[in-house]
Each structure stands twice: as C-alpha cells, then as structure tokens.
Image (cartoon, rainbow, N blue to C red):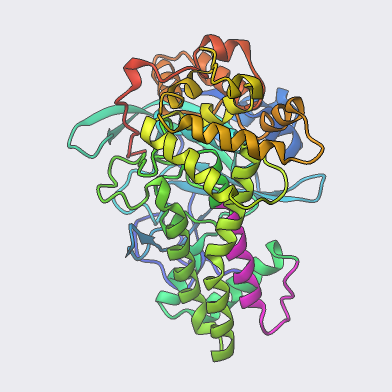
Amino acid sequence: MSVLPVDPVKENYVRKVRNCIFSIAFPTPFKSRVRLVAVSKEVLEDILDLDLSISETDAFIQLVSGEKIVSGSIPLTHRYGGHQFGIWADQLGDGRAHLIGIYKNRQGEKWELQLKGSGKTPYSRNGDGRAVLRSSVREFLCSEAMYHLGIPTSRAASLAVSDDEVWRDQFYNGNITKERGAVVLRVAKSWFRIGSLEILAHYGELDLLRTLLDFIIQEHFPSVDVKEPNRYVDFFSIVVSETAQLIALWMSVGFAHGVCNTDNFSLLSITIDYGPFGFMEAYNPDFVPNTSDDERRYKIGNQANIGMFNLNKLLQALNPLLDPGQKQLAARVLEGYPVLYYTRFRELFKAKLGLLGERKGDDDLIAFLLHLMEETEADFTMTFRQLGEITQSQLQELDIPQQFWALKMISKHKLFPAWASQYLLRLKSNMNDSDSERRKRMTTVNPRYVLKNWMAESAVQKAERNDFSEVHLLQHVLQHPFQMHSAAEKAGYASPTPSWAKDLRVSCSS
C-alpha cells in the first residue's frame, strides 16, 4: 500500500474505479453458522507456519470465513480488466475475493492470503460476492491436486461452509437453484494477472502501469534488474517462457482450465482461478469442460494457441512503455513461444513414454499413440499409467491383462500392433536401461489418480448432504497421485468412468 495507490473512495458499492490498483473492502460475514470442513495441513504448516491444531479454534474459523480480519490488516480488492472469450470486457476485478494480508514465513517467502466467496466488492458487477459449496469444493481439491502433480498453482488452505442461501443458474439455462455459500482461503505468491496491466494500458494510466510493473519485477522477478532499460522486455521474455512451460504441463496431465481469459492468466505463470476446469477422461483434443463455451474456444487442444493470444495481449499492454527497438525485441520473443511450448511438450511426453535420449521418429511415435487413443476414446490418464505398469514382454505378445483396461481398449485398434512394435524397438535404444527401471521411471511421471469430473461431483453430492468423507478421501489420495492407494482403488478412482457419470457436465456458475 505504500507503493501502489488505493482507491480514495472507501464506500463498498459497485462502480467504475480509476487511477488505482486496489480498493479497500471488508469481507461480509455469513449470517448462519459456519463450519470448517477441510484444511490443508501442508499449507498451514509449511507456508503459514501454523500448527494444525490452530484450525480447531474459533479465531481461525472466523478468519478463514471472513467474519473477522487480523487486527491492523486492511483488506483489499484488486482492480483488473481482461479479454474474455477473445473480447475486451473492460473493468472486471475481484468481485468476490478479498486480499486479507501478506505473510512472510520462516523461509522468507511472502504469500498473499485471499478469501474467495467472501462478499461484495466495488468489482462485483451484477454478482452477489459469494461462492457456492459446489465450486469451492472443486477449487479446494484441484489446487492441491495440481500442486502434487508438480504443476505451478495457487494453493488452498481451508474450506469453510455456511447455511446461507445462494442462488445460482448452474448451467446458464434459466434453471436457478438454491445452494450454500462457502469460502476458500487460497494463497499465492501473487494474484497479479495479465488483466492487471491491461486495464491500466487501456485507460492510459501509464505512470501507474510503470509503477505496478516495477513493483512486480522487484518483488517477483529477481533475475530482472529493475534499473535496466530493457527490464520490461526481460520481464516479458520470462512470462512467455514460463507460460509455455505451464501449458505444456497442463497438457501432460490432460488438464483443461476451461476459462483461459487474460484475467485468469497469472503473471507468475501459475494456475489460478479454478472454475469449470476438467481433467480429460477419454482422449479428445476437442475436450471442453466448460458447457458455456459454445464455440469451443478453450478446448484442451487449443490451450497453447490461447496462451499465444493472451501473451500478445500482454505485449499490447506493455507496448506504450517500450521504444521502437524494444518493441521489435519483444515481438521476436513472442515469435519464439511456439518452439518453447512444443519443446517442453515433447520432453514431457517422451518422459511419459519412458524414452531416453533423442531419436529420430520420437515425435511420430507420440503422435501415433495419441491418434490411436483418439480413435478408440482411450482413457488419457490410465493409458499412460498402464504403459508404465505393463512389462515389455506382455506388450510384445499383445497379451494385455484385464487390469490394464485402458490399454486393452486401445489394443483393439488394428494399428496398435504396429505402434507397439515401434515403441518396443525405440525402448531398446534407451542406453543403460532395464524394463524395471523404465516402469519405475514412468510411474513417477504418470499419475494413477487425477481429479476427474465424476470424482469431484461425487464428493460434491455428498458434501451437499453434510458428508465430507469423500472430500477428505480425495484430498488424501490426490496428495499422492503416483502411488496406489487401497481406498482409492475401492472407490474406483483408477477404473473406467462409471455409467452414471458418462454424460456429466461441468458446472459453469460458481
């Protein structure tokens, strides 16, 4: 607050805000009883330096539900804009989120604590400032699941649930239903996003744009010299590279974000704002988890292209601060994005197949497998996992046991023997490798469990009946996604999608 200007208007009503980065707004407490139903022991202990027992206190529940704030803290809501589904949407901002403090932990790391679903703000537009139990369970579980998959992400510390009535049109089809309000305490090194800069450039607030950029560089980009004339190009270069890496990681686990708008793309290249996301089940490059995305703009196979679009919007926001030479440099940086993305993509998929070294034909081998998976609608997660569990001799004989059900499905394709033959030949060229080493290696990069939509939906349905047992089970299982877990196997988390969930849709509203 000593560096970045705050909105001088202190009243909390919806309005256009100019010439500032934040507005002061206090969370709105729930009217009904609040229950703490889930916490992340890791986030509490490793990030916030808190003992897990603190979560049982009234003071903790009051803090994480928005009932009270830490003494001396000034809660802030962030002003940003963004391109939504490719169209400039003007002012957006934190419509139901409150930054309640920044904590510097014993490792010297600074973490921003944000409540989501904590009430109206100047940026709420037509919203009620609330989040519902359904979407809050999904965000809590997925942000922690992504972290344990090794993907940069915001984290979720806690999930608090009320009995307050919140009305939502879940699928935007006119069917409004009553749901329960909930709040997630989520933490990240920063919540600044591409839209944070876009809004300032759009309104010509260039001094403020420069101030915010220098602050972000100083705080979060230590390799960039804030006194260097080319610092904004250097900053842009890092964001381009890390965004390419992030989206390649998404693809490697079959994750579709669902709403890749510029206001949902972090400047730190972490995954934020979990809405209608989905982990792909049957492999399909046209997979769209968000049922309101009629044009399929954010289908999983288009995420890399959307990354390029969003980075181009970031560059347009930076351009007013760049001289002609710097603009040329930055444009060349952006041109390098496809190579950065595809290089990381093929590295990740080679590792998923257990391939060592560089061989001609590796790209074709990956593409051939994905083609067979698409044609047979093979399960994305379990095909790769089972390739890491089956022995080479079983694969050579095309003798696939029933336990490898995803591979059995793909093996019915007439071209599978040809692919298997090429794959086994390629494995022979791995230097100083054995079959057991290959399998060991592959089961450390191919998860056995991801948060499939039907799993999240099952947990949500129970949670809505005040049974949070599956939320806790999934939380535990997804902390160890590469290890077999007996309760997870019993629950069918590594089995084919159950029949009741075949046509399940991901909720849009949250």
Q: Where is residue 467 in the image (x, y as percent from the top left)?
A: 46, 13
- Residue 268 visible in this rendered orientation of the protein: no
Q: Left or right: 451 with respect to 487?
A: left
Q: Is residue 215 above or below residue 275?
A: below
Q: Is residue 108 above or below residue 459?
A: below
Q: Left or right: 459 with respect to 388?
A: left
Where's the N terminus, which quadrant? bottom right
Q: Is residue 329 above or below residue 218?
A: below
Q: Quadrant of residue 229?
A: bottom right
Q: Where is residue 144 in the image (x, y as percent from the top left)?
A: 59, 34
Give the magenta-colored segment's residue range. 223-246
Q: Magenta stretch containing residue 208, yes or no?
A: no
**Numbered disc total:** 0
Q: Of residues 63 and 160, which is closer to you in this image?
A: 160
Q: Position of residue 240 (x, y in %)?
A: 57, 65
Residue at the spot 44% in from the left edge and 69% down from the top edge: 313
Identify the residue at the far bottom of this view.
324
Where's the C terminus, which quadrant? top left
Residue at the spot 53% in from the left edge and 51% down from the top edge: 247
* Helix, strand or loop: magenta stretch: helix
Q: Of residues 360 and 209, which is closer to you in this image?
A: 360
Q: In which quarter of the image is residue 30?
A: top left
Q: In this view, does 131 lie above or below 114?
A: above
Identify the residue at the far left of this view.
174
Q: Of residues 339 and 507, which is closer to you in this image?
A: 339
- Residue 422 visible in this rendered orientation of the protein: yes
Q: Magenta stretch containing residue 241, yes or no?
A: yes
Residue at the spot 75% in from the left edge and 50% down from the top edge: 109
Q: Of residues 415 and 87, which is closer to you in this image?
A: 415
Q: Where is residue 407 in the image (x, y as percent from the top left)?
A: 50, 24
Q: In which quarter of the image is residue 341?
A: bottom right
